Image (spheres, rainbow, N blue to C red):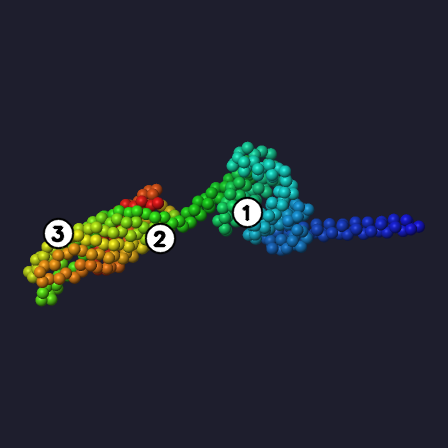
Amino acid sequence: MAIRHLLLLFSILCFAGSSLARKASVEEREAFKNAKIAYKKGLYDTSLNILRSRYNFRRMSTPSGALELAALANEKLGYHKDALVIYTVLIKKKYPQKNQEIISSYRADGNAEDIEGIDEKLSFYYYKKAYNTKALYDESNNELFYKAAQMYTAICIAAEHHEDEAEELFEAVGERKNEYQRLVYKQSKNLLVSYITWQDKLTLVSPSGTKQDIGSSAEGTCLGGGFEYANAYINYKMDACIAFASATVGEDTKEIDYFQSNVTERALFLFPGVRWKPKAGSVSFGMSVPFVYRVGDFTEPDGFTIEGKSQMGLGLMVESGWMYKSFGVDLKLGRIFGFSSTTMSFGVNYIF
């Protein structure tokens, strides 16, 4: 009698468990159906919340259909890292051995040319991983995402499934990498030598106190260097050079007859500035705010004095340049306070 009661109880428990399992299965199918309807209506948040209430997206026991829908909804919402995790679970769930062989082969050879036996579904998962890693690279510029996107697109191209989309993505990844490299600022130094010319602002003062402006034209060589902080489009720079020049000084009026030639002058020039490179090309345009300290060995006639033998000045110059690899030429043209006319510099530089 006791055994009969135990068997009856066991049968009731089995029946109840079976009923509960069927009920849970029906509820899951209903939830999945509602999630698909919400997704098709563009209600991606709603779809994802429905799925999340029923499934754990990190478990391989979760149905593949639910995982795929959750991954697509995450993509639509811009949750690329979450989508990437789900596609990884799908691959490990359905293709554990094959995935290990493919990744090992790629890392060993550095390419996907000899990889075979990738079916369309696996290729689709790899394409989606490439798509999401590229999106993450766009957001973060993390080199690991760039390399992962390259690998997954290369595998898709080798598999010849989703090949066209993968090739477009492969090109986009490469272009995004190049664009990032163009935007990255890098420090560099330069050496420069230039021809430079200016006109001094001098005043000859007579013993009686009469003042007369006298002309002085100087030209010479400026030697120096500088540093730059630049990307492919913009260049913040500081150049400095010491000029060794020779000046011709003279004034011939009724009151004054004064002339000197080969007057030695020395000047320190600082050129803090910025240049722009249209379309990341080799030609650049910009401006600088030069600071100058200049001294000259001007001879003073007996009883006379010369004002402006040494001079400091600040100005504004426009600049242009052209680069080929590490070599370049540049032109600076503008006015400096304390000089009587336009200052011009034309030279060559070497960047390292």
Q: Work out whether mark 1 precedes mark 3 in sequence or the reverse, and give the earlier one.
A: 1
> Residue at left 62%, top 50%?
70
Q: Secondary structure at mark 2?
A: strand
The residue carrying mark 3 is: 261
- Mark nearest the camera among 1 and 3 is 3
- Mark nearest the camera among 2 and 3 is 3
**Would residue 271 be seen by someone viewing this image from the given angle?**
yes
- Mark nearest the camera among 1 and 2 is 2
Q: Work out whether mark 2 precedes mark 3 in sequence or the reverse, and give the earlier one.
A: 2
Numbered circle sitting on residue 297: none
> Residue at left 72%, top 52%?
27
Pointer 3 local density, CA inside 10 Å: few below 14, some 14–19, many at least 20: few
The residue carrying mark 1 is: 132
Are the residues at dot 1 and dot 3 in contact (C-beta closer than 8 Å)? no
Task: Tell me the distance, in whole angstroms, between the alpha carbons under discs 1 and 2.
Answer: 35 Å
Residue 290 position by quadrant: bottom left
| Kind of residue at disc 2 | Tyr
Instruction: Give x and y (percent) for residue 276.
Output: 35, 51
Instruction: Give x and y (percent) for residue 184.
Output: 42, 49
Q: Secondary structure at mark 3?
A: strand
| Kind of residue at disc 3 | Ser
Decide if residue 273 is on the left or right side of residue 159: left
Are the residues at dot 2 and dot 3 in contact (C-beta closer than 8 Å)? no
Q: Residue furthest bottom?
A: 208
The one nearer the camera, 118 or 348, is: 348
The residue carrying mark 2 is: 236
**Would residue 275 be seen by someone viewing this image from the given angle?**
no
Q: Work out whether mark 1 precedes mark 2 in sequence or the reverse, and give the earlier one.
A: 1
The one nearer the camera, 139 or 214, is: 214
